[in-house]
Amino acid sequence: MSEKDDGKLIVKIDGKNLALKPFVQRIIRKAVLAMLSTLRDVEVQGNEVVEINVKRAAT
């Protein structure tokens, strides 16, 4: 990832986009990519499309 990383981050809660300032987008994006890069057999280039869905636990 470059210092001038202009990657986009979209956070949706119950299907609605959460408005995030560019600074917050960069922090979350870089944190997620950094965590994923520590996983075995994962090489992060910085241009990947990553989707994470968090579902409610069944009650």
Image (spheres, helix red, strand yellow):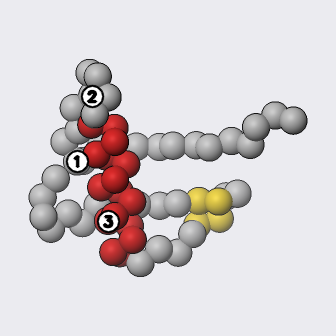
Residue at figure coordinates x 26%, y 21% from the top left:
41
Disc 2 is placed on an element classified as loop
Q: Give the CA separation, mark 1 to mark 3.
A: 12 Å
Mark 1 is on which residue type?
Gly
Which disc number belongs to residue 26? 3
Residue at figure coordinates x 58%, y 43% from the top left:
53
Mark 3 is on which residue type?
Arg
Disc 3 is placed on an element classified as helix
Mark 2 is on which residue type?
Val
Comes first in the chain, label 2 or label 3:
3
Residue at figure coordinates x 47%, y 74% from the top left:
20
Q: Is residue 44 left or right of residue 17?
A: left
Q: Give the CA separation, mark 2 to mark 1.
A: 12 Å
Q: Which residue is mark 2?
A: 42
Residue at figure coordinates x 47%, y 43% from the top left:
51
Q: Give the CA separation, mark 2 to mark 3.
A: 20 Å
The percent position of residue 36, horizontal first and vertical second, equals 34, 38
Q: Which residue is mark 1?
A: 46
